[in-house]
Amino acid sequence: LDFFFNPRSLAVIGASTTPGKAGFIILKNLLKFGYKGEIYPVNPKGGEVLGLKFYHHISEVPKPVDLAVVVIPRNLVVDAVKECCEAGVRRFIIPAAGFSDDGEEGKLLEKRLVEVASRYGARVMGPNSIGTVNVSSGLVTSFVNLEKPGQGPASLVGQTGLFASAFIQWITSSQNFGLSKVACIGNKCDVDESDVLSYYADDDETGCIGIYLEAVKDGRRFRNAALKALRAGKPVVVVKAGVTEEGAKAASSHTGGLTGNFKVFEGLAKQTGMIIVEDFDQLFTALKSFSFLPTPRGDKLCIITQTGAGGVLSLDVYKRYGLRLARLSEETVRKMRRVFPDWSPVGNPVDMWAAIERSGPDETFSVLINAAMRDPSVDMLLVISVLFKGADFNPSIVVDALDRWGKPLTVCFLGGESLMVNEWSARLEKGGVPTFTSMRDAMLALSVLNKHRLNMLRLRSLQAANPTKQ
Amino acid sequence: LDFFFNPRSLAVIGASTTPGKAGFIILKNLLKFGYKGEIYPVNPKGGEVLGLKFYHHISEVPKPVDLAVVVIPRNLVVDAVKECCEAGVRRFIIPAAGFSDDGEEGKLLEKRLVEVASRYGARVMGPNSIGTVNVSSGLVTSFVNLEKPGQGPASLVGQTGLFASAFIQWITSSQNFGLSKVACIGNKCDVDESDVLSYYADDDETGCIGIYLEAVKDGRRFRNAALKALRAGKPVVVVKAGVTEEGAKAASSHTGGLTGNFKVFEGLAKQTGMIIVEDFDQLFTALKSFSFLPTPRGDKLCIITQTGAGGVLSLDVYKRYGLRLARLSEETVRKMRRVFPDWSPVGNPVDMWAAIERSGPDETFSVLINAAMRDPSVDMLLVISVLFKGADFNPSIVVDALDRWGKPLTVCFLGGESLMVNEWSARLEKGGVPTFTSMRDAMLALSVLNKHRLNMLRLRSLQAANPTKQ
C-alpha cells in the first residue's frame, strides 16, 4: 500500500482550473502541504493553474505515475481507470459516490471497476473515498480545503470522509496533537480496513491507530491485522457503527457493507486488544492520550483536586473506567503534609484547597504532584483544577513532573474563565500533558492507557505460553 | 429566604482594603454586578476602599441590615454572628470552612453557631458556603473575582463553591446562556437544598433548576420541594455525588453529611420528576437546553445530517436516550425530494450531502429543516453539521425555523475549522438554538426535554386521578 501514502508521483484525473472545484482544491492542498513528489494534473481541455501545467490525457504524462486520484463523475470512472492502467498506473483513489452505496446500478458499476482493476493487478481505494493524507510526505488527496496538521503518531482509517476533511480541520485549528496518516476507504471495493491497519502496524511513523468502521469486510484478515498492530505495541481504538439494528441498516446504505453482529465484533476486539469507544469525541480523547502519554505500569490512580466536589465525583466514576485508587505511602503523605495546615487531612483524592490557601498554588502543585508521581504505589495521576486568578499555577510544574517521573498525568479543568483555561491548556499540551474539560473524558484518557497495558500483558503471556506461534 | 437573594442592605463582616483578600473581592464584585441595595463593610480597623466607608462594628451601621456575609476565620464566626444578631441582623452567609466538614472540634463549633442563630430566629447559609448570586438584583457574595453573567432562566443550588466561582466565570466568558440565581449551601447547618429548591419553585425569574447534591438533609422536605418545582412546570436537573461507597465517604468529609443510598435517591428522583445526570458538563448541557428550547409535544426525532457517519452513529444511540425515530409523512418526503438529485433516497436520518451538491447548502438547509419541522409526526430535530467553506449554511435559516415552528432543535458540529465553528455556534445560540460538538451531548439535550414532558404528563394524570390532593 505504500504508494497510497508515499507516491513518488501523483496524477489528478479531472484536475480543474476553477477555484472551489474538487479537481482544483486537491492541487491547492498538495501545494499547501508541500507534497514532495511530482504532480500531474490531467484534463482533456488542458490548462494551467497554480504553476502546474495540465496534461490532456494520462498517456501524455512523461514519467511513471505511482498513484492516480480520479475526480470525475461516476459514469466516467471505469473508463478513466482503464486508460490509466493502460498507461501503467496501478494505484487509484476514487472519490465519486453512487456505487455499491447506491442500489443495483451502482453495484454493477462497482463490479466493473473491480474487474478492470484486477485485470491489471491495480489496487483501488474507494469508491466514495476522499482518499489519503500523509503529513510527512505532504500527500493529500482530499477535495476539501485543508491546512496541514502537525506531525504526530496518530493514524486514522475509516469509512468516512470526515477523517480527511472536517476532523483534520478541527485538529489543525484547535488541537495540540498531530497526525501521521489518514485513509478514508469509502466503499472499500478493494483496499479495506485490514489492508490499511496492517500497513499502519508496519509503519514506523504510526504510534497509535484510530478506526471508524461500519462493516468489517473479512473478519479473519481484520483479526490478523489487529494482532499485528498489537504485537507492534500500537494501540488500536475503534468507533464501531451499526451497533443497533437500525444503525446497521443505515450503515449498509451509507457505504454498502453489512455490519455484522456487534457482539461478534466485541469478541473480536477483546481477542485482539482493540479498544472500543462510543463516538468520535471519545476516539480523539483516546488518541490524544496515546499521542502524549506513556503506558502506565499499573492501574492505580491518584487524584489531586482543587475542589472537593471534583474529588467526590471522581470517586464515583473511577471504577467504571477500570482503575483502582492508589494507597499513598506514608512517606508521600508526610511529604504532602508540608504544604497543608496541621488540621487538614491528606488522603486520595488529595483535596488541595487548604494547602493552596496556606502555601500558595505553585508550592502546593509542585510538592503534591511530585510527591504523588514519585510514589511507587501511584501509576497515574489526575489533576482536577479550578482555574482562577489567585489559585492559578505555573503549568511548567506539571509538565516537568511528567518529564521527570514518566507516569501518565492528565489535567481536567472544571469551569474557569475561558481565555485563561485555553491558555493553560495550550501550555500544558505543548508540554505533553493532555487536558480536558470533562472529568469523564480525563478518566477515559487514563483508562485507555491502562487497557493498552493490560492488552500488552495478555499478549506477552500468550506469547510465553506459545513461544513457537507468532 | 428572599433576603438571601434580594436583601435591601448587605453587611460584609471582615471587609478588607487589601486587593486580593476575600473581604475586598466581595465588595468589588458587588460594585461590578451593580448591586442595588446598601453595602455596609465592617472591620474593627475601619478604613475606606472603592468609595465605601468601613464601619468599626455592626452596631454602628445606621440602618437595618437584611443580610450579613461573615468573612472571618472560623474561630471568630460565632461571636460575630451573635453581635450581628444583637444588632438586628437575621440572615447570614458563612464562607469559612472547618466546621462539620472537619472533625469533632468543627462539629462543636457548628453546633454553637446553630444555637446562637436559632436563639435569635436567624437563618444561616453555610458554613463552608461561598454564598449567593442574584443576577437581577446584582447581589453577589462570592469571594472569587467574577464578571456579571447574562440573565437567564437557570438557577443553581449546590454543595459546592464551584457554582459561584469557576462555573460562573466559565458561563460568563464562553457560554450563551445566562443565570438567574445561585446558592452554594456548603455544610447547610440551617438553609438546605429543600429551602432553596422551594424558593426557586416560587421564583418568577427561575425557569429551570440545577442541583449538585452530596447529601439530602431531609428526604420528605426535599421530595415536597421537588414536587413543588414540578407543579410549577420547572425542570430540576441533579448531579448526585456519593453514588458509590467511596464517593459517599468522600462526600461526608467534604461537606459533613451522609449521602444515603443512591437507589433510594433514584426512587425519589423518579417520583418527583427530577432528572439525574452524571456530571457537571451534563448538568450544563441540560440547563442550556431548558434555557433555550420549548418542551416537545412527543418523543419522535428527525435527524438531518451532512455526514453519513453521523446518521449511522446517531441511529446507534437515540434509543438509549429514550427517543423514537419519526416516520416522515409522504408530503414531507415529497417536499424534501425537491432539493435532492432523482436517484437519492430520502429517509430519516436525512443524509443531506447529495442535496447540498445539487441545490447548495442554504436551499438544502431551508427546505429540509422547514419540511421536517412542519411535519406533525416530527417532535424534535437534530441537525448534524460538518462545517467547512462551501458547505456552510446561513445560521438564520435554522434560527428562523425554530421561531416559526416552535419545536426543539439542536445543532451538533462534527469537526470543522474551530473559528468557523465558534462563529456559527455563537450565531445559532444567540438565536436560541443550542449547539454541541458531541453527538451524545446533542442527544442528551433533546432527551432531557422529553423527560420533562413525560414528567409533566405523569403529574397531570396524577392530579386528574386525585383532584383533591395538591
Image (spheres, coloured by chain):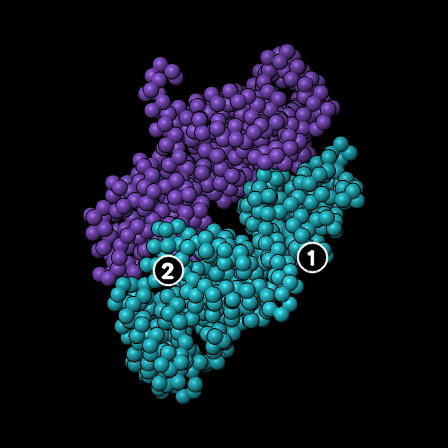
Chain colours: A cyan, B purple
Left/right placement of residue A60 relative to residue B261 reads: left
Q: Residue at x 45, y 69 (%)?
A: A132
Q: Chain of mark 2?
A: A
Q: Position of residue B78 (x, y in %)?
A: 69, 19
Marks 1/2: CA distance? 43 Å
Residue A299 makes an appearance in the image: yes
Residue A446 versus residue A11 in the image, above or below: above
Q: Position of residue B364 (x, y in %)?
A: 28, 55
Q: Which numbered dot is residue A406?
A: 1
Looking at the picture, tell me which residue is in the foreground, B133 or B215. B215
Depth check, front residue: A239 or A35? A239
Q: Amino acid at mark 1?
A: Gly
Q: What subunit carries mark 1?
A: A
Camera-side residue of B53 and A60: A60
Q: Position of residue B2 (x, y in %)?
A: 50, 20
Q: Element at badge 1?
A: loop
Residue lying at 71% horizontally and 50% vertically, measured from the top left = A373
Q: Amino acid at mark 2?
A: Leu
> Image quadrant for the C terminus of chain B?
top left
Disc number for residue A258: 2
Residue B432 seen: no
Up-down relation of residue A437 to residue B19 (above or below): below
**Label located before the other in sequence (1 or 2):** 2
Q: Are marks 1 and 2 in contact (CB under 8 Å)?
A: no
Q: Residue at x 71, y 38 (%)?
A: A347
Residue A141 spot, x, y in % from top left? 42, 71
Please name the residue shown 39% across and 68% down the image. A188
Report crowding for label 1: few under 14, some 14 to 19, many 20 or more residues within 10 A (C-alpha).
some
The crowding category of the residue bearing disc 2, from other C-alpha atoms within 10 Å (few below 14, some 14 to 19, many at least 20), is some
Is label 1 or label 2 in front?
A: 2
Horizontal side, residue B243 vs residue B322: left or right: right
The circle drawn on residue A468 is none
